[in-house]
Amino acid sequence: MAHAPNVLDAKSRDLRGASTQVKAMLATDSVVVKNAAHLHGLCGGLKAGEITIDGDSGDYLAVLNDGAVVKVTGNAGKYVADNMTGGKVLVEGDADYGAAQYCYGGTVVIRGTAGDFTATMNKGATIIIGGDVGNDAATYMMAGDVIIVGNGGENLGNYLIRGNIYIRGDWASLGHNCAAGDVNAEDAQKLEALLKEYGIAADARSFRKVTPLSDKPFYSH
Amino acid sequence: MATIGAFCVTLDKDQCINYRMPGKCATCAEICPYGVFSLNGDNEVAVQNYNTCVGCRLCAEFCPENAIRINPAESELVSRYPWTFGTIEEIHHKALTGTYMLRGFGTMGLTPHFDKIVVVPSQLASPAPKDKYREECHMEVVIGEETCERPIRLQYPFIFPAMSYGALSREAKLALAIAAATTGIMTNTGEGGVVEEEPYYANGFERPNRSRKTWPPGGYLAIQWSTGRWGVSADYVNAGDAVEIKIGQGAKPGMGGHLLGEKVTEDVARIRGIPVGSDALSPCRYYDVLAPEDLKKQVDFLRDVTNYEKPILMKLGPSRPYDDVKMAAEAGVDAISIDGLVGGTGCSPEVVTQGVGIPTIACIGPAVRALKDLGLHRKVKLFALGGIRGGLDAFKAMAMGADGVGFGTAAEIAMGCRGCMACHQGNCPYGITSQNPKMRERLDPEEIGQRLANFIKATAEEVKILAMLSGHGDIRELSEEDLRALDVDTAAITGLKLVGYERPLPWWENG
């Protein structure tokens, strides 16, 4: 039997108040938070639980997330899923500047568009952007996968040293140390599974793959 | 490099084993990080290029027959200025390799520092001196007393500033943790993730179950949150007793940490969460801070993730101390460290270490004024870092208004370092800045931790002597009145009273 989740109206709460309440509610069931756009850093460092932000979120939503599933029905603020190490963050709308930076693990799905410097210094997470992404996406990525269903901006994958960028649309320019090629059968299989899991209608074979030219691009050594 | 060309290296052939039996010994050639000695095809050692000597005397120390002499040739350095051998050597290096020079350690050469400041003792016109042998001096510094559920109580006004695992060996990190525990002060993870044993070692426990304190009274561990975010997770930020947001450091403000792929071994890679052998070059700024209000939000979420228990600290490089410290304090941190020009590093471009940032003594005054203007002086704690060598420097920094000081380079030296400035090469013969197992096994964390603790205790005694002879039984009472500047330059930089003149220079008095 599905039971009704806890609902928290965060309108008049500060971060500490809302966060304490969310943590207490998670002990019993999933949580829906309404009116949370003014709270920055909500759902930080959680290890488990399911939280839905009804509407838009503030900045640094689910920072240091380590296992929780956080959904946003509206748009996410800046730096959503910052430094995530596990779990899932799903944004139905768009994400502002710097989504999914410094992530080590877990999955971030942004169904709309994402801003500049998305997935910067990714060290192992899977980051899917359903729409277009801004400039400097996946800068200095060291591991993991970044999947862009729409178009990329300038400097895509700048100083990429490990990991893969899969992109279906075009890009304005590739960053330093990047080479574009086709996806192989293994890539296509991985993409197909992910696209299916998150209900994104796109042909895995229509993607291109951006990989690092050298794994030591600094100091020319 | 300022020191290159300042030394003459000679080999006493009567004593040298290699001279008598080529191939039997080549310790000097193996140990010198700069290739001063060469081996020819017959395994004969010769002094090949003493211009590259930095005067660390590692070779002399490791020579089994005491056959090496290093003599300063400073006069040559002075008389050839500005075309010193160092300058010439540097130009040759760039011309030969096409790369700029990298090195460890801090600024070399004469920059305004604490030496031109003296301590004023108490006689009649100020409160009488206190008796160091029979009276107490309050040394404790509390961080986050009003803001955190678990404030930090440092037994002495000292910290070990951030030095990362990766730059330092695991053994060196543990030695620092043991020393912090034994003396009740705080060590810092640096930006390279946390070594498993570090949190409980720093608190004084030898085992993770924390059953029995091996190193009482137990100290603290600050967890660094930096621009590279190496090995950072929710568990990581909660592993210690405080979180430090690193904005910059003295040796290379405006640049991120440098850890070359050579030092990214399997263990370093695992703890940093990155591929083995990849260059870990921290970004120079936070990609996730675009505006000052973002910094405030970072402080807020770090408090939230650490359950409002732990102090949040911030570390700044030497730039515009008044405005920087003001912004840091306004972001809501509990303590601010400001690292001066002389601050050290494991690896930095020579030009940056040598010529970027303002001196430590010029940072403290403006930092204190910023805190006073906000009404936060002594509430938000201020730590002065960068070239603090002992109790005298520490006292002077604290009398200028800092609540405490940090020992980075001095701590490395206490561990055995001779200052060869080749930390970045990863072959430190004392196992401090090396990931090489052969070098690392020379460093016993417990023995070296004890050396560090001895250094801290002796330094604390020095501060106590100076505080008490200037009439204070509490280090929080120290003030600028306890100091005088010896020359006009220092008085001009610091606003301290000039000796003889007995007043600050006119523009300080006139605002």
Image (cartoon, rainbow, N blue to C red):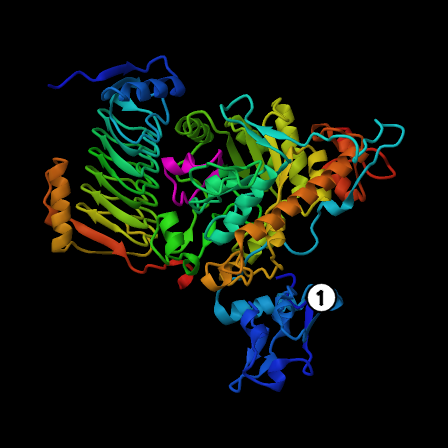
For mark 1, name the chain: B
Q: Is residue B450 magenta?
A: no
Q: Could you tell me which residue is drawn at 11 percent across and 45 percent down?
A: A192
Q: Label 1 crowding class (10 Å Cα cut-off): few <14, some 14-19, many 20+? A: many
Note whether B92 is above or below B284 in the view shown: below
In percent of width and height, residue A101 lies at 33, 40
Observer able to see residue B320: no
B244 or A35: nearer the eye? B244
B55 or B82: nearer the eye? B55
Q: Is residue B225 magenta?
A: yes
Kindly identify the amino acid type of the residue bearing the numbered disc 1: Leu
The number of numbered badges drawn on the structure is 1
In percent of width and height, residue B203 lies at 51, 37
Q: Which residues are magenta?
A: B223-244
- Disc 1 marks which residue? B77
Observer able to see residue B470: yes
Which part of the image, by quadrant, shows the N terminus of chain A?
Answer: top left
Which part of the image, by quadrant, shows the C terminus of chain A?
Answer: bottom left
Q: Secondary structure at mark 1?
A: helix
Left or right, residue A66 beside residue B492: left
Left or right, residue B409 beside residue A123: right
* Residue B496 lies in quadrant: top right
Q: Could you tell me which residue is drawn at 72 percent across and 34 percent down?
A: B399
Note whether A65 is above or below B278 in the view shown: above
Note whether B181 is above or below B30 in the view shown: above
In percent of width and height, residue A152 lies at 25, 44
Residue furthest to the right: B124
